[in-house]
Every structure is written in structure tokens, then in C-alpha cells.
Image (cartoon, coloured by chain):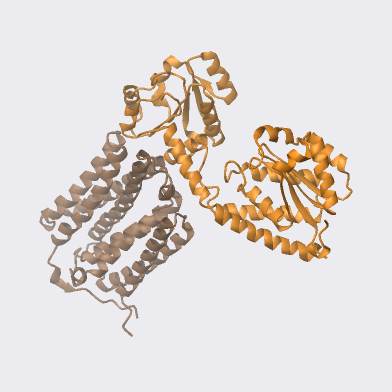
Chain colours: A brown, B orange
Amino acid sequence: MPPITDRTWLWLAAACYLAGVLLGTLSLLRERKHSRALMYFILAAGYAFQTFGLYLRGMAVKGCPLGNTFELLQFTAWSAATLYLVVGPAFRLSLLGYGTALLSAGLSFAALLVPAWDAARRVHVFGGNAWIEFHAALALFSYGVFGLLALVALMYWIRDYGLRRKHVGGAYVFLPSIRDLDHIGLRLLGAGVALLAASLAVGSVWWLREPGSVNLLKLLATVGVFVAYALALALRLRQRLVGRRWALACVLLFLAALLSIVPVDSSRQPLDSAPAPEAASR
Amino acid sequence: MSPAPSAGPLLFHLGASHHTAPLAVREKLALPPARVAELRARLGAAGLPELAVLNTCNRVELYGVASGEAALFSLEGAFCELTGISRDDFAAIRAHATGPAAIRHLVAVAAGLESQLLGENEIFGQVKDAYAEAQSAGHAGPVLNRVFQKAFQAAKHIRTHTRLTEGQVSVANVAVELAATIFGDLASARVLLLGAGDIGEKTAKAFRSRGAAALTVSNRTPERAFALAQALDATALPFEHFTRHLGDYDIVVGSTAAPEAVVRAADVATAREKRRAEPLLFLDLALPRDVEPAVARLDNVYLYNLDDLAKIAAQNLAAREAEVARARALAAEKADALWRQILARHGA
């Protein structure tokens, strides 16, 4: 029997998220509401497996597992699941669990199915500096928030599309109201911007101390994402970016944020510093 | 013709409904409480130990247990006499069933399967009232008690496990449901009613029943606006001022008799400046239309006219109708199981 490694747990987590996707998809196709408790349980199980898998990986690399694309995607998926489990029930959005399952399954499977993304990892990514580690974790956590925001915005866009074309039956009945989606989206946007601002504040202290230690491409990509989201928040608060355009902006910004992970990741030290560990749990 | 004892009690249903009788005839057949008491007094307890009367605007139905066909014949005679309809005329419109078929009918009625507005909820309460009246009159015995209680359970099961009651099928309720898809909880929604037409009033009442607290009525004739505002516990707004206040409302219901649009796209665009991030819903129930179609092109503004709402109502009704066969099968299954229980308890 092959040893149980961190990847085994991460595969189990991905399978749980996929089960959530299947549950939500089947419910939509049958035009029946799925049990929110069941969806929550499935996501919680996936989250537990993913947490354990990332914990094993963290133990093996002696730090926060953010050393390659695989780990970055896993961490973003984990962040989205964390946020859903903490705030999802309060929002009472019937499709948010499904959306979270979709996002986390997509990111997890993408990470697991591309071996090259986990063939090697950087060592001492954060130079043993806990603050830099915190900065990176906070930044990726904000990406998880932005991921949920993109889901909410997508739901808004679909709801708006349906209302304009006079489609309110069928699968549309599972979507929350326009006003609820707008309010939740605004709160998520505020939370994401605050988290990313905190992350940049922590990172900037290090950068000011050692300006040469931060790659310019990484700096530009990260600050660019922050400025774009902060601008979207400011325009939304001033009621200049509302409705469909606001929803579209949130989705496009998240895609841009995801894409920015690639230059951020490649701008760090070379990938072949060390092979990725196969951290066994026993 | 008395059923053999092994066939169980003579449980029956007898009456007429919108399926068989036009409104004018149903009006004659109506049995308000005083008439029900008179019917019971005429019949006495002889031969009819149990009897419940269901009287709604769409049906008059008697459910009971008779000692035999003769008692049933007497009941029909007393009913015709009381309502002033000849036996021959009644025979042409009457619906009658016994045994499991009577239970099937009761379950179908309670579930809304026999209603004019398929799947409506009100009938369930009306059947409950009929049962309560029979109980208080001392005419609900062991058979009717069981039949009605189980029929309520079966009707609830059908309503829960089919889509018979999903989606609204009246324009006023569709409008309110639509508003809920935009605003969620309607308790804080501010509703402006333009005009004092019948459909507007119905819609305003539907909003009120869904918890909308802030209702305002604006009408060309101020007296009519004040009267309707009083009836709805709403406030009145002078008609010539409503455009200035459009931005203060979430939902605008148009039901005026104006020959041309009273809500112009330019006014809505101005109103939107006050509330760009907040959605604005126009429900144009007037004919000719009250709201310029160009309003629908504005961001965060939604416009539904009478045709749009009627189309949604028709779609919901079609979805309900698609469930009828399944609901009837469930009703038959529950009714037959109940009949077997009744035979086991009261058959011999």
C-alpha cells in the first residue's frame, strides 16, 4: 500500500469539494434546493482534509506552504473554504456553498493534476522571517475572499441577466435577491481590500528595510491588484460602479488576481531549489 | 342499495363545484353557516351519524357517513329543498363518490388539486374550517375524524413533495414575488402606488401581506387617493409631486387610467442619481402603460408590465399543471391506504 502523504489528504479534500459540486449541480438540474447542512458538512470535511494536508506539508517544509504554484493554489482554495465555513451560514445564500465547492474543487484539482506545479519548490522562501510568511499568507487569504466575491458577483450578474430577460423561474429561484448579493459583495470587497492592505503593510516594512529583496515584477503585480480592488471599492462606495458593471468588474478583477499569482510566483527564487516533499503522515 | 357490512361504512361525498356548475347555480347552492345548521336540523341524526359541509365560492360539498342509500337520498332531498333546486337540475351538476373515491376527492380538494386556481392554499384552511364546524356540531365521528385528519396529512404531503404550490399564479402575487427576488425581505421596501385601479389595489394589498410597511398612494383624484390610502393604512402623495419623489421609493406600481405614460425615462434617470446603488422596480399594471419602456435600459432599474407578469403567472401555472398527475397518484395512494385502515377498523 502506498504511503499516505500530504497529497493523499489533499486529494481527499478535492474529492469532497467535488462531491459538493456534484450535489449542487444535481440539485440545480433537478430544480430542487439542496440541503445547506449537507453542503456545509461536505465542505467542512474537505476543509479538514485540506487543513491536515497543508499542515503536513508545512511541517515538512518548516513553514507556511507557499513555495510553488501547487501550494499557492491549495492555499487559496483553503482560504475560500475557511471563509465560507466561518461566514457562509450568516449570509444564508443558497448557492454560496455550491460556488465555494466549485471554486475550491477547481483550484484543488488544477493544482493536483499538473505535476509540474509541484515538481520542485523553493526553500527558505521567507528567509525565516515570520512577518514575511504572515504577509504572504494574508495576501493569499485575501485572494480567497476575492474568490468568494467573484462568486457572489457572478450570481449577481446571472440574477440581473435573468431579471432583464424576465426569467425568474427554473434555476433562477435558487439565486439570492439582487439587494442581498449587492450588500454581501460590498462587505466581501471591503474585507478583501482590508486584508490585502494589511498584507502589503506588513510586506512594505520588510521591503523598506531591504529594497533589493523584493522583485519589481512581484511588487508591481501585488500593488496593481491592490490598487485595482481599492479603486473598485472607492467607486462602489461613491456609487460610481454599481449594478452589472460592478459585478463584471469583480469577476474580471479576480481572474486578473489569479493570473498575477504566476508572475508573483515566478519572480521569486528559482524553482529548482528543492524537490517538493512527500510528507508522509505515518 | 346498502353496501354489504364487509364493504365498510357508507362514506360519501356529494356536491357540486366550479367543474360542474356555473357561478349562478353555485350561488343558489351556497350553504352559509345558518343554512348548514338548518340542514342539520332537518336531517336530525337519523341515518347520518357523521356529516361535514364544505362551502366555498367554488364548491358546496357534503362529506359524511350514511347508514344506507336511503339516508343519502334523504340528504340529497333536504339539500335540494333547502337550496331551492330541483332534484333533476341537481342531478345534472352533482358530483358524487363513495368509499375510497370519496377520500381521494377530499384529499385532492384539500391539496388544491380541484381548485380553480390550481394548488392555491386557501382551500386547505376552508376544509379545516368545515371539519371544525362538524366537530363543534357533534357530527364528526370515528370515521370522519380519521378521514379528515389523514386527508390533511396527505394534502400536506402532496404540497411538500410535488411542485403543485410552487410559484405564484395571480398577477398581484407574481408582482410581489418578483419584488422579493430583487429586494429580499420586503419589510423595509418602500412602495409607491400610482393610480387607484383595482389591480393596483390588489397588488398593494399583496405587498402589505408580505410585510411591506411603507406604502404610499398617489392618484389624480386626491379624494380617491386618500380613501385608498386610508383603506390600506398608507400615506397619500399629491399626484403632481410624485416624479420629484420617485427616488425615495424601491417599488413603483403603476395602475392609472392615464392615456399615456406618466413615468418618463428622464424622470427615472434623475431619480436614480439619488440611489444609484439601490435597485428600482417598476411594475406597470396599467393599460395603456404608465411607464416609458426606455426606463428598462437604465442600470439597476427593472421594468415589468402586465404581459410580463401574466407570462410568469402562466409559466408557474404550467409548472403546477405538470405536477397534477403525480399529485393525483399520491392522493390515490394515500386515500386507498386510509380506506384499507377504515375497513380494518370499521368494516365488519
Q: Position of residue B123 (x, y in %)?
A: 65, 43
Q: Nearer the viewer, residue A92 or B193?
A: B193
Asked if residue B172 lies left or right of residue A166, the reply is right
* Residue B306 lies in quadrant: top left
A2 to B65, vertically: above or below = below
* Residue A22 lies in quadrant: bottom left
Q: Is residue A64 visible?
A: no
Q: Position of residue B267 (x, y in %)?
A: 34, 22
Q: Nearer the viewer, residue A91 or A152?
A: A152
Residue at x 42% of width, y 16% of height: B241
Q: Nearer the viewer, residue A269 or B286?
A: B286
Residue at x 67% of width, y 43% of height: B125
Residue at x 23% of width, y 52% of height: A255
Q: Position of residue B268 (x, y in %)?
A: 35, 25
Asked if residue A143 lies left or right of residue B25, the reply is left
Q: Nearer the viewer, residue B134 or B276?
A: B134
B328 to B205, vertically: above or below = below
Residue at x 34% of width, y 28% of height: B293
Q: Residue furthest front?
A: B88
